[in-house]
Amino acid sequence: MGKQNLTLLTDFYELTMMQGYYNNHNNDTVIFDVFYRDNPCGSGYAICAGLEQVIDYIKHLNFTEDDIEYLRSLTIFDEGFLSYLRDFHFSGDIYAIPEGTVVFPMEPLVKVIAPIMEAQLVETALLNIINHQSLIATKASRVVYAAGGQPVMEFGLRRAQGPDAGTLGARAAVIGGCIGTSNVLTAKLFDVPALGTHAHSWIMSFDDELTAFRKYAELYPSNTTLLVDTYDTLRSGVPNAIKVFRELREKGKMPEKYGIRLDSGDLAYLSKKSRRMLDAAGFTEATITASSDLDEYLIDSLKTQGAKIDSWGVGTKLITSRDCPAFGGVYKLAAIERNGKFLPKIKLSENQWKITNPGNKKIYRIYENESGKVKADLITLADEVFSEADPLLLFDPIATWKKTHLEPNSYTLREILLPIFINGECVYQSPSVMDIREYCSKEMETLWDEAKRLVNPHNVYVDLSVKLYQMKNELLDSHAQMLS
């Protein structure tokens, strides 16, 4: 938490490899890509998040004397290597897709260009940060989509896997579309709305429910939301809430915002009954908030059933992404600099999806001009240039017979990998979390509805340029010849 030095937040083998590079006088500049192979949560997309924390991590990379003494105590590291670590800092380049961007499998979310010892060290922390926040941001965007424009609040801190996961997970949830969080530390650190009402213990601490409601209304006269399911929702909670609202109305003290919260039971049935009771009493503007182990599937089901719910508090299943607990991002070597040029590298596998895309790359996002929607993403070599005034042929790099021909001036290109560090210096200013949230909302609007389906969504194509595709196949052929 806080400004703890995270330099040793790395897998042990990163350090043993670094020593191997050091002892072999190998510190060639390399390119590593961070990417993932499958969208999480059965989604048709993901939301990238965590870049601000990556930036902070890279800025503060340094081995303290205490770190070096600890590594010396392991009796595996040479004094020459330990001496090198004393002056260690990141001197390379990093390119990344901005937080809140809609992303797809196999495209680099982060590209690291640096001496191999530096690039190797940062692998673990980059994956830890990007994987976690991208997972929660994606889950949140699905929950928000299911809510259909109704507000979603992040309520998961007490069930998160530790303080960091709860705090940074809440940050990611807001990026994904939540309007705020119950986590006060997140609200303070990232200037996002702190939200919440009261617990059942507030009700139980008074002699009766009605008194508890009255006292709460006195304390918070501008925003009075009453938790109505402590004893009996329909026979006690809602009637007592109505009594308090009537008293406030008679005194001319109606809150600007008021309503009830349901936290248990059949939310569809209870919300419908509660809505009728509130409306019959003349409180048509009273909102109904629901919590209780919600996720995108339950919210979608409740809306299908006609539940009369106005806003949603989502906790455990969001902050832990319970149905998909890992994002699956990887960090793979793509090129090594030799004689001033990058020599492409490829990882082979019997699984075609695990074969990496080699070389120094960039990504073009292609929008259809007529609709403004994403048509595809195109991964190209870094030196390739395309013009919207030219026709463009897209093809699936696996099922190559699947082709799309785009007419000149029918599409728009946008490069989405941006420079973050150049020669070790940060050249990028992270937006505020609320600004990233707004950007993410606009990004979601560029997806077709078919790609946002909760179940069996359409997959957006991620294609390779002809030049990159040919390079990949040449490397595959050369490795096949070596093995034959």
Image (cartoon, rainbow, N blue to C red):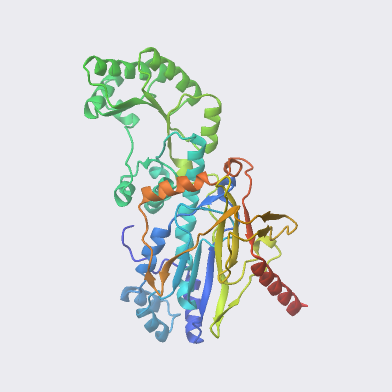
Residue beneath the point at 69% across and 62% down: 352
Seen in the picture, residue 17 relative to 127 is either above or below; the reply is below
Residue 249 lies left or right of residue 259; in this view the side is left
Front-most of residues 475 and 393: 393
User: For the image shown, how many numbered marks are present on the structure?
Assistant: 0
Indicate the position of residue 372 as horizontal and vertical percent values.
55, 47
Extreme residue toward the top, this view: 280
Indicate the position of residue 251 as horizontal and vertical percent values.
21, 16
Indicate the position of residue 457 as horizontal and vertical percent values.
62, 43
Residue beneath the point at 61% across and 75% down: 344
Indicate the position of residue 442 as horizontal and vertical percent values.
47, 46
Residue beneath the point at 51% across and 86% down: 24
User: Image quadrant of residue 217?
Assistant: top left
Front-most of residues 353 and 75: 353
Q: Quadrant of the C terminus?
A: bottom right
Query: Can you see residue 266?
Result: no
Q: Quadrant of the N terminus?
A: bottom left
Query: Can you see residue 103?
Result: yes
User: Image quadrant of residue 237?
Assistant: top left
Residue 149 lies left or right of residue 357; in this view the side is left
Residue 229 lies left or right of residue 372; in this view the side is left
Residue 391 lies left or right of residue 170; in this view the side is right
Seen in the picture, residue 448 relative to 423 is either above or below; the reply is above
Residue beneath the point at 41% across and 52% down: 165
